[in-house]
Image (cartoon, grey):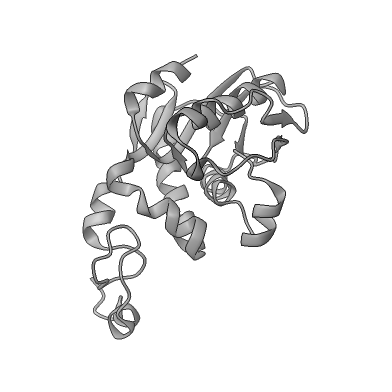
Amino acid sequence: MNPLLGWWEQLTGARCPGCGAPLSQPLLCSSCRAALVPRHLPHFVYLGDYKRLGRLPKAIKYQGQRRLAHYLGELLALGVRQAEWGLDGVTAVPTLPHRQLRRGYNQAELLAQALAQTLKVPYQRVLRRTSWETSQTQKTLRQRLQLAETTFQPARRVKGLWLLVDDVVTTGATFERARKALLEAGAAKVYGAAIAVKSPHDLSRYSL
């Protein structure tokens, strides 16, 4: 390894956004890098368990870690390439306009764009979020599962095989609503990808 790599992180006392350990190399520590392995379900790719990796999407979402989003998007692209889905397009689960304006980006879109760029597959904004509800992170489990069926609506027509990207999947309610909207937009089949999932077993419901 190049001895100059990580000098800035060591000088500034930077810590790994994945686990909080002191950084001796750029972006992520060796332990977190080793934990990020593409995992496959029949129609879904993710990088690990939410309990282990849950700090990573929060670092992108709340700390402006755009480089981290690009790195994780490339890893997800590796998993999608291994799955050999033959995608026609990639899109992201949209956030509300005022949240995207406040942050300057949609974290799921950053991941999706990096993934699409790596795979050389077109990225498009296909969905729009129409429900102005409280953030899912501020809801109880029961409230999350009751997310309105009309939360997402198609913004354009598409066809073929599409990949829907989100940063995390916890209850699966948000992903499921967005997946249905993408099918309504004309997608013949919808695959999924995320950094982390809370319960891989629950994702079997999306193997459609």
| Residue under the point 66% across and 54% down | 100
154 vs 145, nearest the viewer = 145
The x, y position of residue 40, in whole percent, is: 35, 29
Q: Is residue 113 above or below residue 66?
A: above
In this view, 183 is above or below 74: above
At 24% from the left and 71% from the top, the residue drawn is 22
For this orientation, the residue located farthest to the right is 156
Q: Position of residue 34 (x, y in %)?
A: 23, 51
Is there any visible trace of residue 65 in the rendered image?
no
Q: Is residue 105 left or right of residue 4?
A: right
Whole-percent x, y for residue 48 in the image: 31, 40
Residue 129, by quadrant, is top right
Say which residue appears at 52% left-offset and 48% top-offset.
111
Using the image, determine if residue 167 lies above or below residue 28: above
Q: The N terminus appears in which quarter of the rendering?
A: bottom left
Depth check: 66 or 101 in front?
101
Give the quadrant of residue 6: bottom left
Residue 88 is at least partly visible in this image: yes
State the count of labels. 0
Residue 38, horizontal then vertical, whole percent: 34, 39
